[in-house]
Amino acid sequence: MLRWMLPPALLVALILAAWPPAVGADEPPTVREVASELISQCGSGMVLADHDCGIARSMKDSIQVQIDAGNTKEEILDYFAGAYGEGVLASPRKSGFGLTAWVTPLVAVAVGAVAGAAFTWAWAKRPSAAPAAEVPAGPSENLNPYKERVDEDLGLIE
Amino acid sequence: MADLGYAAIIAAFVIAIYAAVAAFVGARARINELWLSTRNAVFVVFGLVSVASAALVYSFFARDFSIRYVAEHSSSDLPPLYTLAGWWAGQAGSLLFWAWILSIAAVVIILRSEKRAREQVPYVTAVMMAVLAYFLGIIAFAANPLEKMPLALSEGTGLNPLLRTSDMISHPTSLLLGYSLLTVPFAFAMAALITGRLDDWWIRSTRRWTLVAWFFLTMGNLLGMLWAYRVLGWGGYWAWDPVENASFMPWLTATAYLHSVMIQQRRGMLKVWNMVLIIITFSLSLFGTLVVRSGILSSVHSFAAGASGPLFLVLIFIVLVGSLWLLWARLPHLRSEHALDSMVSREATFLGNNLLLVGAAFAIFWGTIFPIVSEAVRGVKVGVGTPFYQQITAPIFLGLIVLMGVCALIGWRKASVDNLLRNFLFPLAMAVGAAVVLYVLGLHSIYAVGAFAALAFAAATILLEFYRGVRARHRGHGDNYLIALPRLVWRHKPRYGGYIVHLGIVLLAMGIIGSQGFSTNKEATLAPGESMEVRGYTLTFNDEGLTETSNANSTKVTATLDVSSGGEHLRFIDASKRFEGRSEEPVTDAGIWTRPQEDLFVILGGWTEDGKATFKVFVNPLVMWIWVGGAVIVAGSLIAFWPDARAEQRVPVRRLQPIGEVEASHA
């Protein structure tokens, strides 16, 4: 049994060893990091970091100026949200009403998973029309030659 | 010609309404003459929609700029291929194309399925004609592509320069084909509910239709990614734009449907769920048509904006309320024929796969409409872009990749612990091996290592399936391994076609993870002869500076860069801006050097009068595998729905079964 547990244990050990350290909070952000959190105001709806119209360039210049002035990423995002409205942010804020954008899909999937699991469990408990037989996993090696033979036979009928 | 086309649209609209009503009444009252009349009406509708389509195409080629749609989407200098593409370049023409495809599908169903499902086909026809009539109504009264202007323009405004690519022929048509053909399984499902014949006949009858629709949706999405990568010139291929989301959602639910119908076919289970899935999928295909052509959400596809949004919302409402009411009424007759035997079974894993696929579709739907929801609730329109979708969907898609592998390893009904251990050993070992190798090679991002390990696991399960099948054929028939593989695939097309699709998904996911997680980019303004460094590459703007070339339709400004690494010359890359026709908005022709490990992607951003040019350079790892994976998916899909000559020929054998009755009568 021990040898079966070795690969997963090794994987867990690797995960723990490789877990990224917390990024230093006082490091200044890059223009791309901030621009990845904003939407270009040229009307295309694309993320600012990926867009290059005239307005996008002036927004990126403004980000650079604010980074040079020592502003944090959050302060720069707040500045743009104040100037252009919340529609300039590439993702809703994780507070207030914006939080519902993040939570709703997760809740939906979680509720679906719980409901599905309960439903499946109750279903599995119900008496089956046919007795449950142990069916080998996947396309059984034992059955394949027979299936092939059936195919061959059917081919002979054609 | 435009008047003839418009008259054909009006006539088709009226006759489609007649066909829908006559098919329904004829089937209900069992009036054969009414059904025969319906058949003829369907053929006439097809003919009339074809006439209208031909009139529009003719108007484009005749440069009839008295027609608003032609004037807005073409000009006299447009080459023939792009002139044809004008048909679906805007809202009204796209709807006509949609309707034309549906009219063809209706004719094919009557010709092919009438004898096989005599009781149900009239209802299928009624649903399809009702949908078609609604579309023709929108075309006739709200989005007429043949509308004439009071005065003819001397020249058209031309096709948007971004659309002057070969992708414009294949990408929109593929998506519109996918959307339109999803009407077929929906119509069969409704016919099953109306007639009360709720076994799996409607699933069997529409298996190939659904696969074809899914195939075109897949192609449409992939070609859209390719177009975005090559033409939009921002270094990426998927922007989580509302229109992209709208085409991705029905693909996700259609994929869920293609998997869950297997459970109904094998075990007689999930009958209600399959109905719900096809209703959702069809509604999402209508939503996709609405979003791509209504302009209700700001999008890179805003060149196709139109004014028929409310009419589409009404149609979606009718479809949802009508079909769910019908489903509710039939609920007592949709009981499963079997219970689930075990939580550890392929059925249970398919349920998990369905949950994640539908969950992903819901998450994307929620993100797409959240700006509208926020505006309605708070009066503030918020932005929902790439960071949101990546964070929400990445864990779901990773779960799907893992489940894709697990599904193949677990048998139907119930799997034993011994079987699980035996089947999981090799794929798990591959996953762990991949993780260790990547870590040792210097990949220390835990997310990336986990994602690539999941891909290795899924790929190993698929390869294991192929290995076992080939070995069985080798032992059973004595085929050598090289011959056994194609024979195995050809004799079990749906199954191994499906596995090939899964393999394509793994390759595609590998490309997405590599390019999303490890892309590098740098921007610099260079004078001729100057260089920039990007991740080991040195790019030198050539001494000649920018060159300008022109032909009858376009002018192109090109910068050539010498790419070298470690002092060794590798190749030259051209990056251009192209001015099509009279447009002052340039199109980007990115310089792309594709190799298996990474793409070097160069955009010419702009230039100054003193000869300097601004370049944006990306190094995008593993992008090539997205296109390779896409090609593998397409090949797998073709194999999966390729007609099986043996199955076709076996039908008469099955039909001979009632011979027992003959014997009985003799007795």
Image: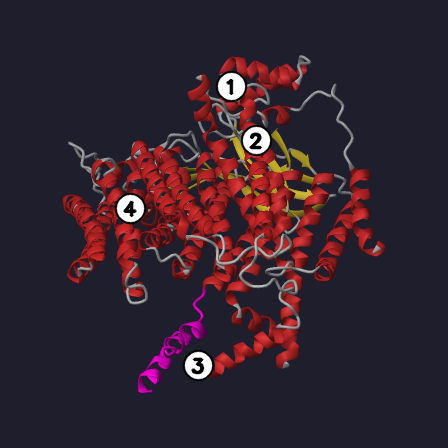
- Both marks 3 and 2 on one chain: no
Mark 2 — residue?
Answer: B388
Query: Which one is in front, B168 or B443?
Result: B443
- Asked if the residue under mark 4 is in contact with the one under mark 3, i.e. CB atoms within 8 Å, the reply is no
Asked if residue B72 lies left or right of residue B185, the reply is left
Q: Is B451 one of the magenta-colored residues?
A: no
**Helix, strand or loop for the magenta stretch, by majority:** helix
Residue of label 3? A158
Q: Secondary structure at mark 4?
A: helix
Badge 2 and badge 4 in a common chain:
yes
The answer to whether residue B204 shows anywhere in this view is yes
Tell me where residue B581 sits by quadrant: top left
Mark 2 vs mark 4, foreground winner is 4
Q: Secondary structure at mark 3?
A: loop
> Percent position (x, y) of residue B297?
41, 30
Q: Look at the picture and state if B490 lies above or below B307.
A: below
Question: Residue A10, percent across and down?
Answer: 82, 47
Kindly report the distance in space between the C-alpha atoms of the residues bearing marks 3 and 4: 41 Å
Q: Is residue B612 left or right of residue B180?
A: right
Residue B331's place in the image compared with B616, above or below, is: below
Q: Residues within 10 Å of mark 3 (few under 14, many from 20)?
A: few
* Residue density around tag 2, few if under 14, some if 14–19, many if 20 or more, within 10 Å: many
Amino acid tagged 3: Glu
Which disc, if any, is residue A86? Answer: 1
Mark 2 to mark 4 CA distance (whole Å): 35 Å
Q: Secondary structure at mark 1?
A: helix
Question: In the orientation shown, which residue stands out farthest toward the right?
Answer: A2
Please state, as top left, top right, bottom left or bottom right, where the C terminus of chain B lies in the image.
bottom left
Dot 4: within a 10 Å radius of its alpha carbon, few (fewer than 14), some, or many (20 or more) residues? many
